[in-house]
Image (cartoon, rainbow, N blue to C red):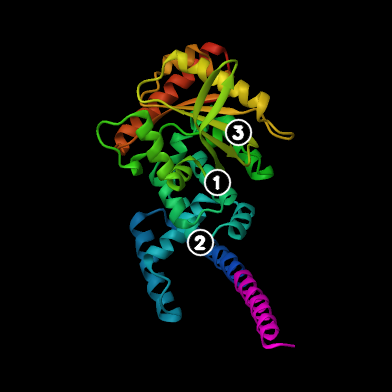
Amino acid sequence: MSELEKRKVEHVLFSEIKSLIEQGRQQVAVTVNAAMTLLYWQVGKRLNNEVLKDQRAEYGQKIVATLSRQLTEEYGKGWSEKHLRHCLRFAETFQDETIVSALRRQLSWTHIKSLIYIEDDLKRSFYIEMCKLENWSTRTLSDRVHSMLYERTAISKKPEKTIQHELQQLGATGQITPDLVFRDPYFLDFLDLKDSYSEKDLESAITAELQRFITELGSDFAFMARQKRIPIDTRDYYLDLLFYHRRLKALVAIDLKLGEFDAAYKGQMELYLAWLEKHELVEGENPPLGLILCAGKNPEHVELLQLHKSNIKVADYFTILPSKEVLLDKYHKAIAIARNSMTLRGEGGES
Protein backbone atom coordinates (compact mmCIF):
# COMPACT_ATOMS: atom_id res chain seq x y z
CA MET A 1 0.00 0.00 0.00
CA SER A 2 1.40 3.39 -1.02
CA GLU A 3 1.72 6.36 1.37
CA LEU A 4 -1.13 8.13 -0.44
CA GLU A 5 -3.41 5.12 -0.04
CA LYS A 6 -2.49 4.85 3.66
CA ARG A 7 -3.39 8.51 4.20
CA LYS A 8 -6.74 7.97 2.46
CA VAL A 9 -7.50 4.96 4.69
CA GLU A 10 -6.51 6.91 7.81
CA HIS A 11 -8.68 9.84 6.76
CA VAL A 12 -11.71 7.59 6.14
CA LEU A 13 -11.16 5.83 9.49
CA PHE A 14 -10.87 9.15 11.33
CA SER A 15 -14.06 10.47 9.67
CA GLU A 16 -16.04 7.35 10.57
CA ILE A 17 -14.85 7.31 14.21
CA LYS A 18 -15.52 11.04 14.50
CA SER A 19 -19.05 10.51 13.20
CA LEU A 20 -19.65 7.72 15.73
CA ILE A 21 -18.42 9.91 18.60
CA GLU A 22 -20.59 12.85 17.52
CA GLN A 23 -23.65 10.58 17.25
CA GLY A 24 -22.94 9.14 20.69
CA ARG A 25 -22.57 12.58 22.21
CA GLN A 26 -25.81 13.71 20.62
CA GLN A 27 -27.67 10.67 21.97
CA VAL A 28 -26.26 11.29 25.46
CA ALA A 29 -27.23 14.97 25.27
CA VAL A 30 -30.80 14.08 24.23
CA THR A 31 -31.11 11.50 27.01
CA VAL A 32 -29.77 13.88 29.66
CA ASN A 33 -32.01 16.71 28.46
CA ALA A 34 -35.08 14.47 28.59
CA ALA A 35 -34.25 13.28 32.11
CA MET A 36 -33.54 16.77 33.44
CA THR A 37 -36.65 18.23 31.83
CA LEU A 38 -38.83 15.60 33.50
CA LEU A 39 -37.08 16.27 36.81
CA TYR A 40 -37.79 20.00 36.53
CA TRP A 41 -41.46 19.28 35.85
CA GLN A 42 -41.67 16.93 38.85
CA VAL A 43 -40.00 19.54 41.09
CA GLY A 44 -42.41 22.19 39.81
CA LYS A 45 -45.43 19.96 40.35
CA ARG A 46 -44.42 19.06 43.91
CA LEU A 47 -43.60 22.66 44.75
CA ASN A 48 -46.78 23.89 43.16
CA ASN A 49 -48.87 21.47 45.23
CA GLU A 50 -47.16 22.68 48.41
CA VAL A 51 -47.66 26.35 47.57
CA LEU A 52 -51.31 25.83 46.63
CA LYS A 53 -52.02 24.19 49.99
CA ASP A 54 -51.50 27.48 51.77
CA GLN A 55 -52.71 29.78 48.97
CA ARG A 56 -50.79 32.78 50.34
CA ALA A 57 -48.48 34.64 47.98
CA GLU A 58 -46.01 35.51 50.75
CA TYR A 59 -45.82 31.85 51.79
CA GLY A 60 -45.05 30.86 48.20
CA GLN A 61 -42.24 33.40 47.97
CA LYS A 62 -40.80 32.27 51.30
CA ILE A 63 -40.85 28.55 50.51
CA VAL A 64 -39.21 29.09 47.09
CA ALA A 65 -36.45 31.20 48.65
CA THR A 66 -35.85 28.68 51.45
CA LEU A 67 -35.81 25.70 49.12
CA SER A 68 -33.45 27.46 46.71
CA ARG A 69 -30.98 28.13 49.51
CA GLN A 70 -31.13 24.53 50.77
CA LEU A 71 -30.74 22.99 47.30
CA THR A 72 -27.85 25.31 46.42
CA GLU A 73 -26.04 24.30 49.63
CA GLU A 74 -26.59 20.63 48.80
CA TYR A 75 -26.05 20.60 45.01
CA GLY A 76 -24.32 23.86 44.15
CA LYS A 77 -25.37 26.28 41.40
CA GLY A 78 -28.41 25.60 39.24
CA TRP A 79 -31.19 25.78 41.82
CA SER A 80 -31.75 29.53 42.07
CA GLU A 81 -35.13 31.04 42.93
CA LYS A 82 -35.48 31.99 39.27
CA HIS A 83 -34.91 28.39 38.18
CA LEU A 84 -37.45 27.08 40.70
CA ARG A 85 -39.99 29.58 39.35
CA HIS A 86 -39.33 28.21 35.86
CA CYS A 87 -40.10 24.74 37.26
CA LEU A 88 -43.30 26.05 38.87
CA ARG A 89 -44.39 27.69 35.63
CA PHE A 90 -43.59 24.52 33.68
CA ALA A 91 -45.84 22.42 35.92
CA GLU A 92 -48.61 25.04 35.83
CA THR A 93 -48.53 25.28 32.03
CA PHE A 94 -48.33 21.56 31.27
CA GLN A 95 -50.27 19.61 33.88
CA ASP A 96 -50.50 16.36 31.88
CA GLU A 97 -47.38 14.20 32.30
CA THR A 98 -47.96 12.47 28.95
CA ILE A 99 -47.59 15.82 27.18
CA VAL A 100 -44.43 16.53 29.18
CA SER A 101 -43.02 13.10 28.27
CA ALA A 102 -43.47 13.88 24.58
CA LEU A 103 -42.07 17.42 24.84
CA ARG A 104 -38.93 16.41 26.72
CA ARG A 105 -37.86 14.13 23.87
CA GLN A 106 -38.53 16.73 21.18
CA LEU A 107 -37.44 20.08 22.64
CA SER A 108 -34.65 21.26 24.88
CA TRP A 109 -35.21 22.76 28.33
CA THR A 110 -34.14 26.13 26.90
CA HIS A 111 -36.93 25.89 24.29
CA ILE A 112 -39.43 24.96 26.98
CA LYS A 113 -38.43 27.91 29.19
CA SER A 114 -39.34 30.25 26.33
CA LEU A 115 -42.60 28.49 25.53
CA ILE A 116 -44.06 28.31 29.05
CA TYR A 117 -44.30 32.09 29.29
CA ILE A 118 -46.55 32.34 26.21
CA GLU A 119 -49.97 32.92 27.76
CA ASP A 120 -52.22 31.92 24.86
CA ASP A 121 -52.59 28.12 24.56
CA LEU A 122 -53.08 28.12 20.78
CA LYS A 123 -50.16 30.45 20.18
CA ARG A 124 -47.96 28.24 22.39
CA SER A 125 -49.09 25.11 20.53
CA PHE A 126 -48.27 26.79 17.22
CA TYR A 127 -44.70 27.55 18.29
CA ILE A 128 -44.25 24.05 19.73
CA GLU A 129 -45.31 22.40 16.47
CA MET A 130 -43.24 24.75 14.31
CA CYS A 131 -40.19 24.19 16.54
CA LYS A 132 -40.53 20.46 16.04
CA LEU A 133 -41.29 20.68 12.32
CA GLU A 134 -38.51 23.08 11.33
CA ASN A 135 -36.03 22.13 14.07
CA TRP A 136 -35.68 25.71 15.31
CA SER A 137 -32.81 26.70 17.55
CA THR A 138 -33.73 28.58 20.74
CA ARG A 139 -32.51 31.79 19.08
CA THR A 140 -34.76 31.19 16.08
CA LEU A 141 -37.71 30.53 18.39
CA SER A 142 -37.02 33.78 20.24
CA ASP A 143 -36.78 35.70 16.95
CA ARG A 144 -40.05 34.19 15.67
CA VAL A 145 -41.94 35.04 18.86
CA HIS A 146 -40.49 38.57 18.90
CA SER A 147 -41.53 39.13 15.26
CA MET A 148 -45.08 37.96 16.11
CA LEU A 149 -44.96 35.11 13.60
CA TYR A 150 -48.12 33.48 14.95
CA GLU A 151 -50.13 36.69 14.67
CA ARG A 152 -48.84 37.12 11.09
CA THR A 153 -49.91 33.67 9.86
CA ALA A 154 -53.30 33.24 8.22
CA ILE A 155 -54.20 30.47 10.67
CA SER A 156 -54.31 32.90 13.62
CA LYS A 157 -57.33 34.65 12.09
CA LYS A 158 -59.32 31.40 11.85
CA PRO A 159 -61.88 30.10 14.38
CA GLU A 160 -60.38 28.42 17.45
CA LYS A 161 -61.58 24.94 16.47
CA THR A 162 -59.98 25.28 13.03
CA ILE A 163 -56.65 26.32 14.58
CA GLN A 164 -56.76 23.40 17.01
CA HIS A 165 -57.56 20.93 14.21
CA GLU A 166 -54.74 22.13 11.93
CA LEU A 167 -52.18 22.13 14.76
CA GLN A 168 -53.24 18.62 15.84
CA GLN A 169 -52.96 17.44 12.23
CA LEU A 170 -49.52 19.05 11.95
CA GLY A 171 -48.35 17.37 15.17
CA ALA A 172 -49.71 13.95 14.22
CA THR A 173 -48.75 13.79 10.53
CA GLY A 174 -46.36 16.66 9.83
CA GLN A 175 -48.84 17.80 7.18
CA ILE A 176 -48.77 21.58 6.79
CA THR A 177 -51.39 23.82 5.13
CA PRO A 178 -51.00 27.14 3.28
CA ASP A 179 -52.60 28.92 6.25
CA LEU A 180 -49.63 27.84 8.38
CA VAL A 181 -47.13 28.87 5.71
CA PHE A 182 -48.17 32.30 4.42
CA ARG A 183 -47.83 35.43 6.53
CA ASP A 184 -49.27 38.91 6.59
CA PRO A 185 -47.45 41.24 6.84
CA TYR A 186 -43.94 40.31 5.73
CA PHE A 187 -40.96 42.17 7.21
CA LEU A 188 -38.45 43.29 4.57
CA ASP A 189 -36.59 45.80 6.74
CA PHE A 190 -33.31 43.96 6.07
CA LEU A 191 -33.39 45.20 2.44
CA ASP A 192 -32.29 48.65 3.64
CA LEU A 193 -34.26 50.44 0.92
CA LYS A 194 -34.37 54.24 0.77
CA ASP A 195 -37.54 56.32 1.03
CA SER A 196 -38.07 56.18 -2.72
CA TYR A 197 -37.59 52.97 -4.71
CA SER A 198 -39.05 51.16 -7.73
CA GLU A 199 -40.42 47.64 -8.12
CA LYS A 200 -37.15 46.74 -9.83
CA ASP A 201 -35.20 48.11 -6.84
CA LEU A 202 -37.35 46.01 -4.50
CA GLU A 203 -36.88 42.87 -6.60
CA SER A 204 -33.12 43.43 -6.91
CA ALA A 205 -32.77 44.00 -3.17
CA ILE A 206 -34.69 40.78 -2.43
CA THR A 207 -32.49 38.82 -4.85
CA ALA A 208 -29.35 40.28 -3.26
CA GLU A 209 -30.60 39.33 0.20
CA LEU A 210 -32.18 36.07 -0.93
CA GLN A 211 -31.20 34.01 2.10
CA ARG A 212 -32.72 36.52 4.52
CA PHE A 213 -35.84 36.79 2.35
CA ILE A 214 -36.24 33.00 2.41
CA THR A 215 -35.83 33.09 6.20
CA GLU A 216 -38.72 35.55 6.38
CA LEU A 217 -40.81 33.44 3.98
CA GLY A 218 -40.16 30.19 5.86
CA SER A 219 -37.58 27.42 5.88
CA ASP A 220 -39.24 25.18 3.26
CA PHE A 221 -39.07 27.70 0.41
CA ALA A 222 -36.55 27.13 -2.38
CA PHE A 223 -35.71 29.79 -4.96
CA MET A 224 -36.47 28.85 -8.56
CA ALA A 225 -36.32 31.94 -10.77
CA ARG A 226 -36.33 35.72 -11.02
CA GLN A 227 -38.27 37.42 -13.84
CA LYS A 228 -39.68 34.07 -14.96
CA ARG A 229 -40.68 34.41 -18.62
CA ILE A 230 -44.28 33.42 -19.29
CA PRO A 231 -45.01 33.38 -23.05
CA ILE A 232 -48.72 33.42 -23.91
CA ASP A 233 -49.84 33.72 -27.53
CA THR A 234 -47.64 36.45 -29.00
CA ARG A 235 -46.93 38.21 -25.68
CA ASP A 236 -44.32 37.70 -22.99
CA TYR A 237 -45.09 38.26 -19.31
CA TYR A 238 -42.53 38.20 -16.53
CA LEU A 239 -43.21 36.88 -13.04
CA ASP A 240 -41.12 38.67 -10.41
CA LEU A 241 -40.11 35.66 -8.30
CA LEU A 242 -40.79 31.93 -8.43
CA PHE A 243 -40.24 29.61 -5.46
CA TYR A 244 -41.03 26.00 -4.60
CA HIS A 245 -42.38 24.93 -1.21
CA ARG A 246 -41.11 21.52 -0.23
CA ARG A 247 -43.83 20.46 2.22
CA LEU A 248 -46.74 21.94 0.26
CA LYS A 249 -45.26 20.35 -2.89
CA ALA A 250 -46.23 23.38 -4.92
CA LEU A 251 -44.72 26.20 -6.94
CA VAL A 252 -45.22 29.62 -5.35
CA ALA A 253 -45.42 32.65 -7.66
CA ILE A 254 -44.63 35.98 -5.99
CA ASP A 255 -45.61 39.30 -7.53
CA LEU A 256 -44.21 42.50 -6.01
CA LYS A 257 -46.27 45.70 -6.03
CA LEU A 258 -45.26 49.13 -4.73
CA GLY A 259 -48.72 50.52 -4.12
CA GLU A 260 -51.93 49.24 -2.59
CA PHE A 261 -53.67 46.09 -3.81
CA ASP A 262 -55.69 46.54 -7.00
CA ALA A 263 -58.39 44.22 -8.35
CA ALA A 264 -56.47 43.82 -11.61
CA TYR A 265 -53.65 42.08 -9.74
CA LYS A 266 -55.89 39.07 -9.18
CA GLY A 267 -56.42 38.48 -12.91
CA GLN A 268 -52.71 38.87 -13.59
CA MET A 269 -51.82 36.31 -10.92
CA GLU A 270 -54.54 33.90 -12.11
CA LEU A 271 -52.96 34.05 -15.58
CA TYR A 272 -49.51 33.25 -14.15
CA LEU A 273 -50.84 30.33 -12.08
CA ALA A 274 -52.80 28.87 -14.99
CA TRP A 275 -49.68 28.97 -17.20
CA LEU A 276 -47.51 27.41 -14.48
CA GLU A 277 -50.04 24.63 -13.93
CA LYS A 278 -50.19 23.91 -17.66
CA HIS A 279 -46.48 24.11 -18.48
CA GLU A 280 -44.46 23.65 -15.27
CA LEU A 281 -46.43 21.25 -13.06
CA VAL A 282 -44.81 17.83 -12.64
CA GLU A 283 -46.37 14.59 -11.45
CA GLY A 284 -47.03 14.53 -7.70
CA GLU A 285 -47.11 18.31 -7.29
CA ASN A 286 -50.08 20.34 -6.10
CA PRO A 287 -51.46 23.29 -8.11
CA PRO A 288 -49.32 26.45 -7.91
CA LEU A 289 -49.95 29.10 -5.28
CA GLY A 290 -49.72 32.87 -5.71
CA LEU A 291 -48.55 35.53 -3.26
CA ILE A 292 -49.10 39.20 -4.08
CA LEU A 293 -46.97 41.44 -1.87
CA CYS A 294 -48.32 44.99 -1.68
CA ALA A 295 -47.59 48.14 0.30
CA GLY A 296 -51.28 48.14 1.28
CA LYS A 297 -53.66 45.16 1.36
CA ASN A 298 -57.08 46.83 0.89
CA PRO A 299 -59.03 44.14 2.83
CA GLU A 300 -62.45 44.87 1.32
CA HIS A 301 -61.08 44.35 -2.19
CA VAL A 302 -59.62 41.03 -1.06
CA GLU A 303 -62.93 40.02 0.53
CA LEU A 304 -65.12 40.99 -2.44
CA LEU A 305 -62.82 39.18 -4.87
CA GLN A 306 -63.26 36.05 -2.68
CA LEU A 307 -59.56 35.28 -2.67
CA HIS A 308 -60.15 32.91 0.27
CA LYS A 309 -61.59 30.50 -2.30
CA SER A 310 -58.55 30.68 -4.58
CA ASN A 311 -54.87 29.75 -4.47
CA ILE A 312 -53.93 33.44 -4.21
CA LYS A 313 -52.76 35.15 -1.03
CA VAL A 314 -52.38 38.90 -0.58
CA ALA A 315 -50.11 40.35 2.09
CA ASP A 316 -48.64 43.66 3.17
CA TYR A 317 -44.92 44.13 3.46
CA PHE A 318 -42.90 46.57 5.55
CA THR A 319 -39.48 47.86 4.50
CA ILE A 320 -39.24 49.63 7.87
CA LEU A 321 -40.00 47.52 10.93
CA PRO A 322 -43.20 48.80 12.59
CA SER A 323 -43.77 48.99 16.33
CA LYS A 324 -45.40 46.11 18.19
CA GLU A 325 -48.42 48.34 18.84
CA VAL A 326 -48.94 48.88 15.10
CA LEU A 327 -48.69 45.14 14.44
CA LEU A 328 -51.13 44.28 17.22
CA ASP A 329 -53.58 46.86 15.87
CA LYS A 330 -53.33 45.31 12.38
CA TYR A 331 -53.73 41.84 13.89
CA HIS A 332 -56.90 42.72 15.80
CA LYS A 333 -58.38 44.47 12.77
CA ALA A 334 -57.56 41.44 10.58
CA ILE A 335 -59.30 39.11 13.06
CA ALA A 336 -62.38 41.35 13.12
CA ILE A 337 -62.53 41.43 9.31
CA ALA A 338 -62.02 37.64 9.07
CA ARG A 339 -64.75 36.92 11.62
CA ASN A 340 -67.17 39.30 9.91
CA SER A 341 -66.46 37.65 6.54
CA MET A 342 -67.07 34.17 7.98
CA THR A 343 -70.34 35.36 9.54
CA LEU A 344 -71.50 36.76 6.20
CA ARG A 345 -70.54 33.49 4.47
CA GLY A 346 -72.41 31.53 7.14
CA GLU A 347 -69.35 29.62 8.34
CA GLY A 348 -69.44 28.24 11.87
CA GLY A 349 -66.77 27.79 14.49
CA GLU A 350 -65.87 29.34 17.79
CA SER A 351 -63.87 32.56 17.85
Query: Residue 92, which numbered label?
Result: none
Mark 3 highlights which residue? 251
- Type of the residue with mark 2: Trp
Disc 1 to disc 2, C-alpha distance: 16 Å
Look at the numbered disc 1 and give the secondary structure of its residue: helix
- Marks 3 and 1 close (CB-CB < 8 Å): no
Vertical placement of 248 versus 4: above or below? Answer: above
Residue at the front extreme?
A: 234
Q: Residues within 10 Å of mark 2 (few under 14, many from 20)?
A: some
Q: CA distance from mark 3 to mark 2?
A: 37 Å
Q: Secondary structure at mark 2?
A: helix
Q: Secondary structure at mark 3?
A: strand
Q: Residue at x 70, y 83 (%)?
A: 5
Q: Which mark is residue 130?
A: 1
Where in the figure is residue 114, as x and y percent of width and height? 44, 54
Q: Amino acid at mark 3?
A: Leu
Q: Which numbered mark, 1 or 2, is in the foreground of this view?
A: 1
163 falls in the magenta region: no
Position of 218 relative to 317 (above/below): below
Indicate left or right for 166 with 141 as reference. right
Do the numbered discs 3 and 2 sit on residues whose CB atoms are within 8 Å? no
Q: Residue at x 62, y 22 (%)?
A: 275
The one nearer the camera, 164 or 64, is: 164
Q: Which residue is mark 2?
A: 109
State which quarter of the image contains the N terminus.
bottom right
Q: Which residues are magenta?
A: 1-27
